[in-house]
Amino acid sequence: MSQSSTIAMAHWRRLDLDGTDRCTLSRVDHGWMLTGQAVWRDNGEVSLSYVVRCDKDWYTLSADVAGVFAGQPVALRLARTPQGWTLNESLQPDTAMCTDVDLSFTPATNLLPLRRLTFKNATPVPVNAAWLVPELDQIKRLDQTYTRLDDCTFTYASANFTARLDTHPSGFVTHYSGLWDGWVDV
């Protein structure tokens, strides 16, 4: 029988659109799990549930996304294999070296590298993420960096994008400049 214990729950509101997201971090038998629900309006209502599974060292193993997007049902299975990431069992190119999954529609997955990485001073730490693109139809490699500014503040950067991340001690983002604002219950 599987055991889990809730560590923290994050709540966010979108700053760029009308929307919310709520995510629970749980410790499970062999690692960690994020479960959440993101809802927003963008040419119609979008409602996506997600589950992300990590091993005990915060390496992402798989993710599921289900719901309604652009008026269509969504049922996605993302899985890390030795050859790379698969999307509904279809191998995605150039993803073999991707450690983390990045679900483009939620700040929840920023928690994964923030919990796993070791930060020294203000030195950027590179991450290769398996990025589920906003259209939800493919996974691409997204090179990212996280730079620790202080105990709870980081800079996130990827190609042509930079944001300040304020975080809770749990690792959840509480403010993602221009995109998300929220709080964490423990």
Image (tube, helix red, strand yellow):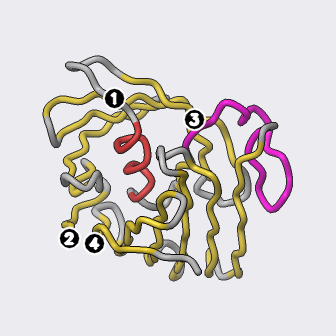
Give the residue at x 69% y 48%.
139
Report which residue position mark 2 lands on.
Answer: 186
Amino acid type for the residue under numbered disc 4: His
Instruction: Tell me the crowding category of disc 3: few under 14, some 14 to 19, or many 20 or more residues within 10 angstroms, Cα based.
Output: many
Q: Secondary structure at mark 3?
A: strand
Q: CA gap, disc 4 to disc 1?
A: 26 Å
Residue 71: x and y in percent read 65, 82
Instruction: Tell me the crowding category of disc 1: few under 14, some 14 to 19, or many 20 or more residues within 10 angstroms, Cα based.
Output: few
Q: Nearer the viewer, residue 31 or 102?
A: 31
Is residue 127 highlighted in magenta? no
Quadrant housing residue 119: top left
Q: Which mark is residue 118?
A: 1
Give the residue at x 76% y 39%.
84
Magenta residue span: 84-100
Residue 94: x and y in percent read 75, 32
Give the residue at x 70% y 58%.
78
Q: Earlier in the sequence, mark 4 or mark 3?
A: 4
Q: Nearer the viewer, residue 185 or 70?
A: 185
Amino acid type for the residue under numbered disc 1: Thr
Q: Which mark is residue 11?
A: 4
Residue 152: x and y in percent read 16, 43
Q: Secondary structure at mark 4?
A: strand
